[in-house]
Image (cartoon, rainbow, N blue to C red):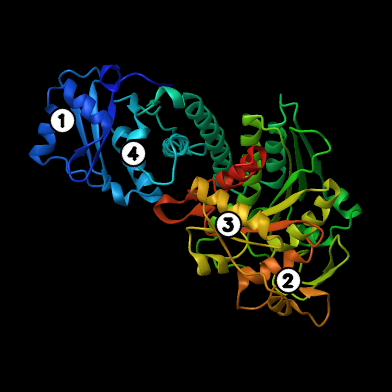
Amino acid sequence: MRFNVNTTNPESQPSACQIITVAQPRKLSKSGLLLDKASKGYLASILKSGDMTGKLGQCLLLHRVPGIAAERVLLVGSGKDSEMNERSFTRLIDSIADTLSSSGAADAQLCPADISLKGRDLAWKVRQAVLLLSNSKYNFDRMKSSKQKADKGLRKLTLNIPAGDTAKAKQAISEAVAISAGMDLARDLGNLPGNICTPSYLAKQAKLLASGEKKIKVSVLDEADMKRLKMGSLLSVSAGSRQPAKLIVIEYRGADAKQRPIALVGKGVTFDSGGVSLKPGAAMDEMKFDMCGAASVIGTISAVAKMDLPINVVGIIPTTENMPDGLATKPGDIVTSMSGQTIEILNTDAEGRLILCDALTYVGKFKPGYVIDIATLTGACIVALGKIPSAVLGNNQTLINELIRSGNQIEDKVWELPLWDEYQEQLDSNFADMANIGGRDAGAITAACFLSRYTKDYKWAHLDIAGTAWKSGDSKGATGRPVPLLTQFILNQVKGR
């Protein structure tokens, strides 16, 4: 989908569809009033007839409105101005996308300045509209023998912008297009089945990022390399798999080498059977999504590269399967991590933290300014927070606050959970330095407590995306989150926003 900016009056612009918002009760927007004047009261007569009240999400598609250059006029209800918020804005744009997807309109025009939203500027509305409309076009049919025919719906959107705001609007579009492409890449990787998206496949996709991109360097460590580095914790997870584990390193060098990089560490379990602690069969197919943390790292670095941001970012992706082979790790086994700390593995289905801890030790060689790990780590996180926010925990309040702020800026929300020392006791082991689980209570927190033991030298935050990385049911599939959050955070570091 293509996006551009225009500054001329909407009533005189030829297009397949002119989008006009209507607030309650039956109140035309500024652009709507211009169209109504050009049509000699035609739109006002429609409102008086009761066919459009302005209720949020209500849509009415009109054809050949007199005096208007556009072939169609789409009236979209924006609700009461006093009740318009970010969620309402999302519903408004989703309604536009749904209506135009089933129409014959290949292009359309929208005036985002007409949408009154307290606390959000025009650039925000432009970027969110582009993100939402781009994401509405996503379709995954790579594994189907019969591909979906080319979409005949909306393919181009022109944003009518006041002349003084064009530069900011174009920048917002550029950012949104890059973020959306990063989300699509993450979703594609997440939606691929485990027999295709293996650790080796992920490594190959990471290397594709570096193709023709001078600022990206990718290196891949194999199991022999990990053995030399004494990554006994990570290798304990891959022991039962016939697919070799990989440790993928993606370096984006957009700034002076002296600048300390932001490190993103993404969990990449390409299929999680639970190992010997086997998961129930129901919905086990969704465990192909257990590499969405890794996918978000690849998607985020892709977006950063597309925007050519002047910053250094390093992505570390430990990736493996977790399978119940005869050589698989057993409950009660004790392994030694790269840090030298020993771990009693009480449950082989708590494997994400076992691969992340070695990756979090390894990342120290890059002397990062911030370290953020991203993982579909615990079902307990879904119990605690549902599927709306990701959880954030960490050892640096400034970093946590910045992530929360970034999530609020781009509607990819996170919520902080406590990481108090009292929870650490749940990881006590009679036989090793720690156990890999802390019991039934506070599972998302004790998982982060485990990781905190490997991040004492860093400013570190942990994102548990178990509830937000994918959807189940009829809309099953990867969401691309938290690519928007991570990219916004990086943008903020660049621009001092």
Q: Position of residue 344 (x, y in %)?
A: 79, 74
> Position of 169 compared to 257: left or right?
left
The quarter holding residue 414 reads bottom right
The type of residue carrying mark 1 is Leu
Give the mark, 2 or 1, whose residue is nearer the N terminus.
1
Q: Nearer the viewer, mark 3 or mark 2?
A: 3
The type of residue carrying mark 2 is Asn
In the foreground, 360 or 281: 360
Give the mark, 3 or 2, whose residue is nearer the N terminus.
2
Q: Nearer the viewer, mark 4 or mark 2?
A: 4
* Total count of labels: 4
Disc on res. 477:
none
Q: Nearer the viewer, mark 3 or mark 4?
A: 4
Q: Position of residue 274 (x, y in %)?
A: 64, 65
In the foreground, 381 or 420: 420
The type of residue carrying mark 4 is Ile
Kindly report the distance in space between the C-alpha atoms of the residues bearing marks 4 and 1: 18 Å
Disc on res. 436:
2
The type of residue carrying mark 3 is Ile
Give the mark, 3 or 4, whose residue is nearer the N terminus.
4
Disc on res. 43:
1
Q: Quadrant of the N terminus?
A: top left
Kindly report the distance in space between the C-alpha atoms of the residues bearing marks 2 and 1: 65 Å
Give the mark, 4 or 2, whose residue is nearer the N terminus.
4
Q: Residues within 10 Å of mark 1 (few under 14, many from 20)?
A: many
Instruction: Name the residue located 66 percent from the left edge and 69 percent from the top edge.
Output: 419
Q: Which residue is mark 3?
A: 465
Does residue 39 show up?
Answer: yes
The quarter holding residue 328 reads bottom right
Q: Which residue is mark 4?
A: 115
Q: Secondary structure at mark 2?
A: loop
